[in-house]
Amino acid sequence: MRRPGARVVLALLAAWLVVPGCTRPWQDPRSPTAAAMHGPPPPPVRLPRWLPRAEVFWESGPRYRFLDRPDVTLDGWRPGFSLTGEPVIDGRIGVKLHLDAAGFASAGGAEDVPSDVAVRRAFLTSSGVFRLVRPVHYNLEFGFLQRSFYLDSAWLMWRDVPWVGTIRFGALDAPLGFENRMSSRDRTFLEMPAPVQAFVPATSLGLFARRRFLDERLSAGLGWYSVGQRRDVGDQSRAVARVVGRTSYLVRAHDEAPAAGAAATAWPELLHVGMAGAYTFAGADQMQYQSRPESFLAPLAVDTGSIDAASAYVLGLEIAGRRGPLSFQSEYLHAFVDGAGHTFPGFYVAAAYLLTGEQRPYDREQATFGQLVPARPLSLRARTFGAVEGAGRWSWVDLDDGAVEGGRLHEVTAGLNWYWNRWVRWQAGYSLAFVDGGPLDGRLHVFQARFQLVL
């Protein structure tokens, strides 16, 4: 059997043996034999001066820069051109890999679900800043999501735009809710809760503007989105257009001291509240909502099927907070289908506790929780074990209303996370899903684990 790995090793060894200037451990490069074999050193390679210089380096992950930013000036109405030595592009390259394994046990009449191992996400990512007239931020994430090619995001962003704030354009996630705004890298549980799965649309082509007020504690954003990608669950409506808005307020920030005379335990040290809304115009198409038990390897649990309606809207309320290593969050979502008169509610509440004492950071840019980095990364030499987190969640979504018999789903989840460092995390979880009606009628026990690598 041919082994591609062996061919690569042999090719590298051959190149090392013949490339001029390579010193062998058995050979002195100053010897006549070496000079006769290799000749004089090759001349340095000089790129055209109009090409930017580039460098690749490591800084909390692989990064790259293209230097020599052009600078155009006017001196006496005569244009001048020079290179400043500053980076014209400054970015990073990343990898996002989620490898899942799950086992299931059915009861109460639910269909049997086979165990499985699969790649949940395998993305290449690149993000950074492009500087010409003004800085332009960019982000690109693409790869395989649940065995299919998926463009997770591809956008350009301009900050500090007068009267507007921040503008983002491209393939975007709709800013509907707290959990949906979090990166999959940072979510406490393996999957989003059932109501968020049911009512949040997939990545879509859109334009989103957001502005922050009151020392960045109040955030308000509004976006327009067009046709997006199909999702395996969630809002399956093929929308002609969506208008989505979200506003949030940081009632109490972690770096603020209690008011004079107030008890230190009167508030969590961080408290976030928010609301969101989405209006979907489907035209001549139909509306449809779906959700599965909180494992992507499980089958659909509840599904409205196609509903003849031209439009619908979703309203959401959210609250989150933190007190030391304890954090919590909760959301209520409600979908209203115009014309058909159907309504579908959903709710979840979740809490997590970091047994090793870290505090979950809050990202004011996204108005949600951010990436947790262990205070003491895993190191056998230093006898440190990273960060350990326990979590629990209860979620519910009701897709039954009148003639629509999509089913009701209640789910209880317990999870355990082990953070080795900022790049590697292991997750394990157990869920018990109670399904009344719908495609999966009965009870389903879900045992699931994940290896996560994010650079």
Image: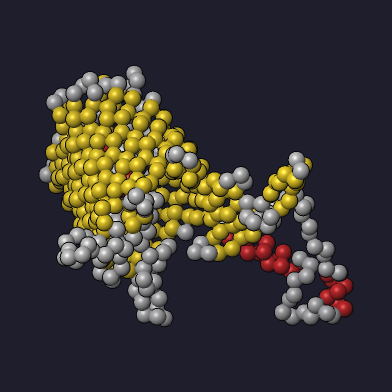
Whether residue 120 is visible, yes or no, is no
In the rendering, at what x and y percent does residue 246 appear? 32, 40
User: Image quadrant for the N terminus?
Assistant: bottom right
- From this view, report whether residue 59 is shown above or below residue 441: below
Residue 336: quadrant of the picture = top left
Comparing 359 with 343, the one in front is 359
Residue 277 seen anywhere in this rendered image of the structure: yes
Report the front residue among 156 and 444.
156
Q: How far from the left and from the top, in percent, is residue 306?
A: 27, 25
Q: Nearer the viewer, residue 444 or 406?
A: 406
Residue occupying the point 83% across, 79% down: 30
Colour pattern: secondary structure
At a point 49% along the width and 42% down the height, the residue shown is 161
Outermost residue toward the left in this view: 108
Up-down: is 123 above or below 309? below
The answer to whether 311 appears left or right of 397 in the picture is: right
Quarter of the image where one finds residue 166 = top left
Q: Nearer the viewer, residue 113 or 273?
A: 273
Tally the marks. Answer: 0
Residue at image position (75%, 71%) is 22
* Left or right of 168, for residue 1: right
Q: Position of residue 305 (x, y in %)?
A: 25, 28
Query: Along the horizontal axis of the image, is 140 left or right of 345?
Result: right
- Residue at image location 87% in from the left, 78% down from the top: 32
Q: Which residue is at the far top?
A: 284
Where on the picture, by quarter, is residue 388?
Answer: bottom left
Residue 324 locus on image (x, y percent): 25, 66
